[in-house]
Image: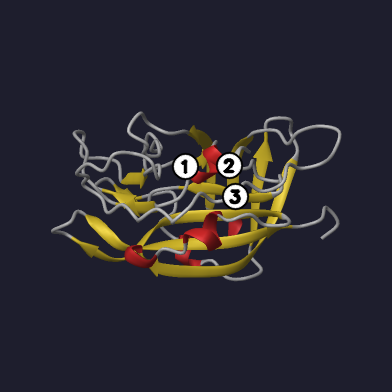
Amino acid sequence: MQAGRLAAAVAFAVGLAVTATGAAGLLVTRHPTAVARPAAAIVLPAPAGPVAAPPRPSGPRPVARPVTLTIPAIGVQTPLVSLGLAVDGTLQVPPTAAVAGWYTGGPRPGAIGPAVIAGHIDSRAGPGVFFRLAELHPGDRVYVRRADGTLAVFRVTSVQMYPKDSFPTQAVYGPTPDAELRLITCGGTFAAARGSYLSNVVVYATQQPHNQ
């Protein structure tokens, strides 16, 4: 992916906000060059400079787009919607709290670099697709089915919770030598006055060879 597109994925925050329909949580990612404006959810600061794009994967064919996500350990099985950037530089949100979304400005799952999949923890209607994300443990498996029928298998290596005001942008979005996955939602204490959670849950995972 190009550096400019990957840089758009910095300053990531996931929080709960009530929409006009009273349903979905709000997922906000602001482009570092976007003009600041009031927002219902907390927006994390951009890094001092753009995050370098990971090297392009080698091989005879590109990695196909992801279509479904399965996490047996926490009972997740969901289609994946594509998340781009809105005109104001924020990340588009999944249409409902019941599905997760893949950020199209970053690597595809199975390509070199950190692919990012985000989902809501809950909504006014109840638990969201990533309600139990923080319950994952190192060694748990994550499966991403792609449009060409291939399956990318990832192994969880770490589960972390970060205050939104100290989100580790480089660790989450920075280049990696291998194919990795980041699963992100909100967590921690819910601040009713702000209408959002105060922390982010980030699951780090690495792709496994087919024979493991």
User: x, y percentage for residue 179?
Assistant: 70, 52
Distance from the alpha carbon under mark 2 to that under mark 3: 5 Å
Q: Residue at x 85, y 38 (%)?
A: 59
User: Which of the pair 196/141 is nearer the observer?
Assistant: 196
Relative to the observer, which residue lies in front, 121 or 177?
Answer: 177
Q: First in sequence: mark 2 or mark 1? A: 2
| Few, some or many residues within 10 Å of mark 2 (<14, 14–19, 20+) | some
Which tag, 2 or 3, sits closer to the chain's start? 2
Q: Which mark lies nearer to you, 2 or 1?
A: 2
- The Cα atoms of the two marked residues, 2 and 1, are separated by 9 Å
Label ID, residue 100:
none
Q: Name the residue under label 1.
A: 8
Proximity of marks 2 and 3: CB atoms separated by less than 8 Å: yes
CA gap, disc 3 and disc 1: 11 Å
- Amino acid residing under circle 1: Ala
Mark 3: amino acid: Ala
Image quarter (top left, top right, bottom left or bottom right) of the C terminus: bottom right
Query: In terms of secondary structure, where does tag 2 sit?
Result: helix
Q: Which of the two residues, 199 or 80, is positioned nearer the viewer here?
A: 199
User: Colour scheme in the image?
Assistant: secondary structure
Residue 188: x %, y % from top left: 33, 67
- State the residue position of label 2: 3
Determine whether the residue tagged by mark 3 lies in a helix, strand or loop.
loop
Residue 52: give its label.
3
Q: Badges 3 and 1: C-beta atoms under 8 Å apart?
A: no
